[in-house]
Image (tube, rainbow, N blue to C red):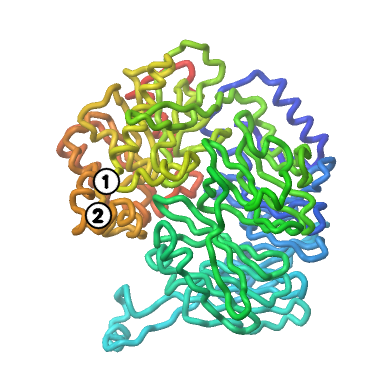
Amino acid sequence: MCRRIVWTSWIGIAWSIAIAAAELPRGVTIEDYFSLATVTQLAVSPDGQHVAYGEARWQQATDDRKTDLWIVPTGGDSPPRRLTFDRANCRSLQWSADSQTIYFLAERKREAERKPPYDGKTQVWRIAISGGEPQAVTQVEGGVTGYGLAPATGQLVYSIDTSVTDEDEFSPLRGRLSTLRYHTGKRAVSELWRLDLGTWRADKVLAEKRYIREFAVTADGRRIALISAADDTVLKSEGESRVDVWDEGRLTTPPTDAYRARASSPHAWLESLAWSADGRRFAFCAIFDAHPAEIAIGEKGQDSWRIDLMPRPADTQIHGYGSPLKWHPAEAALLFLADRAGRTVLLPSDPAAVRSLPAPELADHVVYAFDADAAGRLGVVLLGQPDRFPELYAAELKAGAPLRRLTTLNPQTAAWKLPTVRHITWKADDGTTVGGVLELPAETKPGTRLPLVVGLHGGPTTSVKAALEYDPYLGRVWLPAQGYAVLCPNYRGSTGYGDKFVTDLIGRENDLDVADIVAGVQHLVREGIGDPDAVGVLGWSNGGYLTNCLITRKTLPFKLRAASSGAGILDTVMEWGINDEPAYPKVFKTGLPWERPDVYRQTSPTYGLGNVATPTLIHVGENDVRCPPGHSQMLYRALHEYVGVPTELLVYPGEPHGLGRYSSRKAKMEWDAAWFRKYLGGPAENVQR
């Protein structure tokens, strides 16, 4: 494993690249994954001179990945500088009006201090771009849950968690038997507070007995848009959350029909609030399972606020969960991300308003995040490409402006034998064009048949992108290093291939999606790439569910020799009954279990368990509420106790739906590698340990 070095000058970066390039190219190892630095978010200063970003790194000693704050000039002629060094998970980056100070959320803990701000709870901090010790802006008992800066007026708004008790005739009994855990009676809610950064006086702004999931403040602090629900549960947020507007002391709820009644589904997740520079409009994403995402625009009329869905440009699918929104300050347009056939591109809401975006690379590759300065003259993107891991680039927001690279986050990868990455397409049985990402081992000769691993993404209303990504869940980068071809299909229900491609999956799970995956494997067999006698599959979440669907098929046109099912659903009635988002199965199955029992049965791999002949490795987090461990336990019981197929169940202590610990991710990859090596085989000389 390469020693991890933080370089503080371009000379150091250049020297490290030269050293790496001078080394003999070597295969990628599992340990290499934990050497990668990842940009978690970015924020451009109002004057466009700097970009602040969070850089996350793994640390074995603490068994986690945490984020520090970095800054780099946008001119491209100076190196990045690290501003924090204590791995306090810096995030939610916002700039002061004069571009000299960065505000952020973080958790800091000092053993000798047991009170805020050093008790490990989340607080708002700030640091000058020149560096120095971060200063605590808030010192709230219990910490804050979010904040918004009004830079024009020197105010900061923050939210805190609290609770309310809903009284009924059983309240006294609950109070007397308080050691029991109840599902009613007490709710998590929020309060909003406003802090004057000049006087340090804090005043309560809002306490409406609702839980605030997200909020955004105008530059002058006069208005706040917020997404709230009755409590903090997913059940209330996935179809009952709403957008409210606090307007100079008055709270109103604009009509919700645009994103509830008139949208393709009433079960939208709401996120990514963004105000225009003048504070007259706001935007947010309405993201649906099984339906294309939409952008909603709020605007005040003469007497009231109204919300409408933004007309989507032709052939455009808005990127879903976590997609940033940014109003172009100089033009009447909103910048957003859109999915297109294995890519994510940056687009304006009105092509006529913003004449052109810079550099063709923004249309040809994958934009993970972006931001722009206050004047709309300069933008910064986190850009992924097929031959390199993501880096930050800057460009003027004008036609043909070239990109200039700002970072070299992972110079050690110059010595790695990286896979070739490309987007491919094939035809499903019904004639539909299906796409996906194919990764082949470095230096694979044409005509070489390889053992094939199919990596299945979650969602399913998302997609795999044709950029270099080291992915422990899909096997990307590290399984090609072991001699396998890896195909990541964007099966029916995935984004980037048109609205119909997404909605076709409604009522057709364990059907069209599986058929698309099977057709992709057959395509690679016909192309002379995949070995039909040596196919494996792995996936997580919905990818785990589809793995379960594949292994329970009675017949397949290839030999499925090994499987790794991660956090997968097995029974869809149980999915509706015990997971944390019951609207998901309701939408995909077009009703409740007693309304559509035939669909729930057809979509459940449970009834095909007797067909399983594939050795199957099973992973699940102990505290997973999205795909609870009961599904994995049922799968293991069936295979181990009744069917007699080689199997192993791995339960990761304390882990939720995703694996957050260094040790957990490493264990998963090591087990997958050993499992595929035993049951799928592969060129032994390509196996890296």
Task: Please give the residue where the numbered disc 1 appears in the rendered image.
Answer: 570
The answer to whether 122 appears left or right of 133 in the picture is left
Q: Residue type at mark 2?
A: Met
Residue 176, can we see it?
Answer: yes
Residue 147 lies, in percent from the top left, at: 63, 69
Q: Quadrant of residue 14?
A: top right
Q: Residue type at mark 1?
A: Leu
Residue 303 lies, in percent from the top left, at: 60, 81
Seen from the viewer's position, the closer of residues 398 and 206 is 398
Which mark is on residue 574?
A: 2
Local SS, label 1 = loop
Q: Residues within 10 Å of mark 1 (few under 14, many from 20)?
A: many
Seen from the viewer's position, the closer of residues 280 and 167 is 280
Q: What's the residue at 41%, 43% (across, down)? A: 500
Q: Quadrant of residue 635?
A: top left
Q: Is residue 606 placed above or below 116 in the rendered structure?
A: above
The answer to whether 553 appears left or right of 514 in the picture is left
